[in-house]
Image (tube, grey):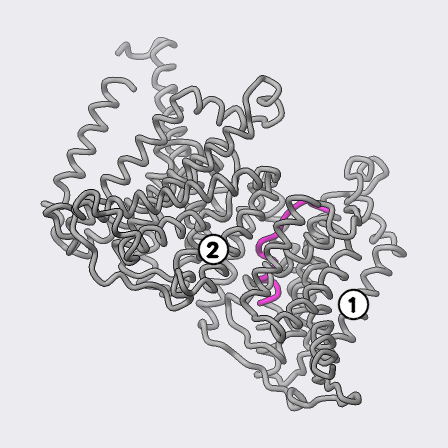
Amino acid sequence: MTLNKKLAVMAAILLLIVLPMLITNNYFRHIIIIIFLSIIFGQSWNLLGGYTGQVSFGHALFFAIGSYGTVLFITNQSLNELGGLFGHTLDPILALLFGAFCTIVITFILGLMIFRLRGPYLGLGTLALAQIGMVIAMNWKSLTNGGEGILLLDVPPIGPIELLGKLPFYYLSMTLMLFSVFFVYHIINSRMGYFLMAIREDDDASEAMGVPTRKYKILALILSAFLAALAGGFNALYVGFISPHDVFALHISIQMIFITIVGGVGTIMGPIVGAVLLTILSEVFQAYLGNAHLLVYGGLLVLVILYMPEGVYGFIKQKWERKRMVTAGAGITGGEPD
Amino acid sequence: MDLFLQTLISGIMTGGIYAIIALGLTLIFGVMRIINLAHGEFLMLGMYGSYFMFTFLGIDPFASLFITTPAVFLLGIILYRYFVSKATDGENSLILTAGISLVIANAAMLLWSPDYRHLKVSYGTEVLQLGSVSVSYPMLISFIITIAVTMALYWFLNKTDLGLAVRASAQQPEAATVVGINVKRIAMFTFGLGAAFASISGSLLSPVLYAYPTIGTLFVVKAFVIVVLGGMGSVEGALIGGIILGITESLGSVYISTGMTDAFGLILFLLVLLFKPSGLFGITAR
């Protein structure tokens, strides 16, 4: 990262920290929280689908396990005793981590099997996994309370901070969002990141070059699922209610894909752009189209795949760089010196 | 024993309709290697087409079939020509069809509201008594049409020039091009044909099921299960797979529970996909 970029990132973070002072309207705060959540969605899916090239249609599964793990940690007596180790001061955080831990364990087992599949078949397989998860959650009534779902009556505080109103959730989601962005950024700029991108470009060739492809696909799946689980856990704390039909829903998996693809696959900025764009658009259109606002989602996706394969962010970046190149080129051919 | 026989027969009837949905999907996959996630929406359009023709014009769903099916066939061709054929690889076309599916389902929701609609034909509740087993008339007619349609497809693929061209494009796209088959046009035609099959099943289901804009999702998952069980791209496999799924669901919902049956189907789907990708019967894709 260049110094300029570092300064820009720091300025952006500072802005996010003071933003709630400027925006006091609860509705707008809610929208920003949803954008943060969507960014985590996008970063999670992008790590596996964008950087590693393994398209999943079942990320709702990881979201759901994360949210059930989080809720059960708070509502289940024996699990909750684990929180006693910290004097119950960190319960929501521990609950999030417990949800993520459950997801990692289950994802590891699934990862061992699911990467027998490639390309579109992997998409179908993961789709089926999420559906199976939903059926299990519907029928395992003693754990999940079946289709009625679980209501989280009161969320325990984090230390002295009561999780009430929008403000604490704003900062919690902001922290998780920033964590997800830096987490993926760090992976992508490590040795592992190059392995993942090699697998995306050519699975067999990278195996031949000595990349342990299976191991790294499973690792990418686990890390991606970990982020999705954090999003699920946060969502459960924020909404206060989960049911199999809400958290295992196909539209959650699809939303993660759309945010990434509309924004720009395989870039850090892409999911951020996609999350902002899609959240605002769907809020605006929800007012006009009601339930049918997903029409805009679908239409935008079709247009982006056909006409902007690099996504909205990639498209803008390309235009901007071309413009800069044209100006630079003018300098060489005898135009005005800078 | 009567209950068993009754359940078995109704399972076979439903399975026949599942088979037509799966036939459309497997045709498209066989020729273009495209997994069409918008397949269920074509079924939904067929259902609504028959519903509206019955409500406003009084045309029987088994007759309006001959109007809705060509319409959806055309829609399929247009969608393929201008959208689906432009996607570059398998994953992209998968995501693209997911987008198309969302657009069609939500446009339907906007135009026709998310209400459940029911088409009530006069013979809707009448049954044919065969000894101790009773069969509902709409289901029986649907089953007969299913058999006719499947036989027509079989004849088409094996005996006509166009059918042979479709099979050639599925088996060896390059070789087919060399011998003068316009593979792109065949692909377009096949996509329309696949959509038409989904639409037929929608019309057949319209007297027995409620129509609503997102009903497609329910059936597209079933169609995938069938296609994977029977072997991707295999016509015979789709037929056998459809009947097996119909019987399993029907027996399962009577003797076990509906929820568990759904899970069973999906788990079987995943296992076959993982360990025997050519399908349960080893009929290889053609």
**Which residue is located at x 66 percent, y 83 percent?**
B59
Label 1 to label 2: alpha-carbon separation: 32 Å
Where is residue B139? Give x, y as percent: 70, 79
Q: What amino acid type should be assigned to the residue bearing mark 1? A: Val
Give percent across and percent down for residue A303.
48, 46
Q: Position of residue A262 (x, y in %)?
A: 42, 42
Q: Are marks 1 and 2 on the same chain?
A: no
Look at the image and tell me in which quarter the N terminus of chain A lies: top left
Q: Which residues lie in the magenta part?
A: B31-44
Residue B166 shows in the view: no
Helix, strand or loop at label 2? It is helix
Question: Which amino acid does the dot numbered 2 rest on?
Answer: Leu
Label 2 marks a residue whose chain is: A
Quadrant holding the C terminus of chain A: top left
Q: Position of residue A111 (x, y in %)?
A: 52, 39
Q: Tell me which residue sits at (37%, 48%) in the image.
A: A66
| Residue located 52% across and 79% down the image | B117
A26 lies left or right of B283: left
Relative vertical location of residue B74 with respect to residue A116 in this rendering, above or below: below
For the point 48% across and 72% down, the residue is B112
Residue holding disc 1: B149
The chain that hosts pointer 1 is B
Of the numbered discs in the image, which one, if any, rests on residue A332? none
Is A289 colored magenta in this rendering?
Answer: no
Residue on which disc 2 sits: A250
Q: Nearer the viewer, residue A135 or A34?
A: A135
